[in-house]
Amino acid sequence: MSDDNTVKTTMVTCTAPVNIAVIKYWGKRNEELILPINSSLSVTLHQDQLKTTTTVATSRSFEEDRIWLNGKEEDITHPRLQSCLREIRRLARKRRNKTNPDLDVAGLSHKVHICSINNFPTAAGLASSAAGFACLVYTLARVFGVEGELSVIARQGSGSACRSMYGGFVQWILGQRDDGKDSLAQQVEPESHWPELRILVLVVSADRKPIGSTSGMQTSVKTSLLLKLRAECVVSKRMEDMIEAVCQKDFSTFAGLTMKDSNQFHATCLDTYPPIFYLNSVSQQIINVVHKYNEHYGETRVAYTFDAGPNAVIFTLEQHVPEFVQVIKHVFPSESNGGKFIKGLQVDDTILSEELKQCIGLEPMLNKISYIISTKVGPGPRVVEDHSEHLLGSDGMPKKTQ
Amino acid sequence: MSDDNTVKTTMVTCTAPVNIAVIKYWGKRNEELILPINSSLSVTLHQDQLKTTTTVATSRSFEEDRIWLNGKEEDITHPRLQSCLREIRRLARKRRNKTNPDLDVAGLSHKVHICSINNFPTAAGLASSAAGFACLVYTLARVFGVEGELSVIARQGSGSACRSMYGGFVQWILGQRDDGKDSLAQQVEPESHWPELRILVLVVSADRKPIGSTSGMQTSVKTSLLLKLRAECVVSKRMEDMIEAVCQKDFSTFAGLTMKDSNQFHATCLDTYPPIFYLNSVSQQIINVVHKYNEHYGETRVAYTFDAGPNAVIFTLEQHVPEFVQVIKHVFPSESNGGKFIKGLQVDDTILSEELKQCIGLEPMLNKISYIISTKVGPGPRVVEDHSEHLLGSDGMPKKTQ
């Protein structure tokens, strides 16, 4: 390409976090707008361990919208991608008309190239769509100069993505409106609020891919009477109690509600017809270990939560991490039980008392947990200032290094 | 013992059936009287395959009430045994006072010896307390000449025992009264009503004994919001629909409700805190097989139900038994897969089509089902007329042959 023909390419790269719900979202009242049947609340995980990075480029020279996910070009016509692109462009147009009709932040008629990668393996079975759509919407908004409430747009990509638009503790408010404008995410407390809180993702070796959450929740809404009763009679009180527990940093209440809500979500899956099982025998054993550990100390020191798969997410306080990790290693010995078994934040070694081992008293299950990701509460999406981090080259194509 | 000292011993032997609930009982509103939080409905299994036999003897010479269960003397002071003995003696006294003050059907002041055996191994994990208490109450009533509504007494021994007081299809009505007098069993249809209906008990090899139903349901009542909502909002409509399906011999509706109610019961166990798991990976696989089998034919030909353990009880119609049993043998190959694998009613051999095998398409699980008991709907408790069948000798002690 000669200098004469140089076309300006606008390029922005951002990162966004994974979030894990402690009051679960399961079931839509509107499939297209992705409006939930109940409010939910999540904890944003730290991006040092788990994040999506997305680069969006726009240029007059691009002939069509294109997207590459984890190194592979994907179909841009996917309805949920189209929803996000359409909504961002609509807001950008509105903004331009209002403020400066001549402003062309990044030519609205221009096509975009999108490139996105996760820093964690898809095989880990961690829901990547929340971080992915949050990152997409956040990055597109920067490119097109859109500000304001972006969580309603992220929500239309993937429901739980709206919660990844903020750091710390985030609620997704149910909302009342049919157009979904009031079904949005709000930060309850920032990531700095509860520095002692620690999170362990126990990646369970899955035999087969479980049923996807989109079709799973559709079947649940259609068939589970208990899901309907949960949404109507249980969740709103639980949201209040959970927000109070988070604000007070009351770990025992936070942990109890987290476990109860995870169990109730999986109960509604079992009440679905035909029933859906996301918890396998390893998940059940993790649940047993947590309850036995808490019983041993006569207080709730550790909590589990499970999404639409067998992996456990564990919440505990910093001072209990080394011992509980040792308990997990004891019950789930792994052949890779060396440096590689724990990824992320360092976990100190410790020795379990015989008393504790006896109290746990469960048959060891070999190689059933692949590894543990040790992390903590983290911030929301960020712009990456270092241009060398762009995932697209100046030609608008993915860099070769990926 | 010389002829001069011979003391008259009254002796009665009866048998009673096992029942399996298709609308589940889980949770008491009154622990002592055993009053449930919702109505339930069961199918009485045939005693040719599964029954309890009980002999009760009474004699002036007996010094105390005693009981032997499956060859071992047990503690007669168990509160639930005492409830049944007390209630039968109270009714007998009432009856004597009303009808013939001098009548002493079997001396009311006399002590009883009770001997009871099951014709199925306890290790099979089949709830034997329902058949046991039904048989005890039925036999005691014969000995003491008590007639009338006995299910309210059996209920006080073990809740579900009240349903084993009748053959065929039986409902246990919730009742409204605080004294429990209207919480009783009623036959919905006799055993002759639906001769095509067949029942297969899939005895799953359990690793460990699950939590007992008495303490399990206590914890559920205390902690599961979904159990409360189920009892208040779901069961009464389901009872109506189930009774209608039974009366109409509408297998598809009967089967669908049976599976949904089993799943909902286990969902409330999972919603219990700490959660209770009765379904293991084998149970989950049986559930998968049933749904895949039904999907293959585009109609509901087979239904599962699970109580407080991993064993499955399968309902189907006679014509589908050979093929479905073959499907089970295919998915759960057993090293004892010969004559011994199927107990009870004969099941003809058949060959599975490749198409069906492919449609099922599940990884075989070796030796995970110990055996199958093939049975059908059966009658209620019976008196055994043949005196040689008494389990107690003329001395009132268990016969040596046991």
Image: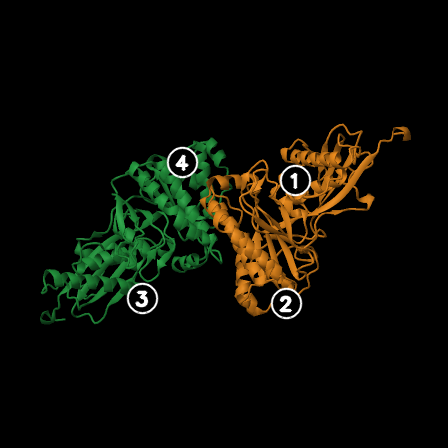
Chain colours: A orange, B green
Q: Residues within 10 Å of mark 4 (few under 14, many from 20)?
A: some
Percent x, y for residue B108? 16, 66
Q: Is residue A221 left or right of residue B104?
A: right
Q: Is residue A26 left or right of residue A49?
A: left
Which amino acid does the dot numbered 4 rest on? Thr
Give the CA distance from mark 2 to mark 4: 55 Å
Q: Name the mark nearer the viewer: 1 or 4.
A: 1
Give the CA distance from mark 3 to mark 1: 64 Å
Which amino acid does the dot numbered 1 rest on? Ile
Please tell me which residue is depicted at 43% across the width and 52% down the height of the picture.
Answer: B227
Q: Residues within 10 Å of mark 2 (few under 14, many from 20)?
A: few
Q: Name the mark nearer the viewer: 2 or 3.
A: 3
Q: Label 4 belongs to which residue? A: B300
Do labels 1 and 4 touch, CB within 8 Å? Answer: no
Q: Label 3 belongs to which residue? A: B78
Label 2 marks which chain's residue? A
- Do marks 2 and 4 share a subunit? no
Give the CA distance from mark 3 to mark 4: 44 Å
Give the CA distance from mark 2 to mark 3: 45 Å
Do labels 2 and 4 touch, CB within 8 Å? Answer: no
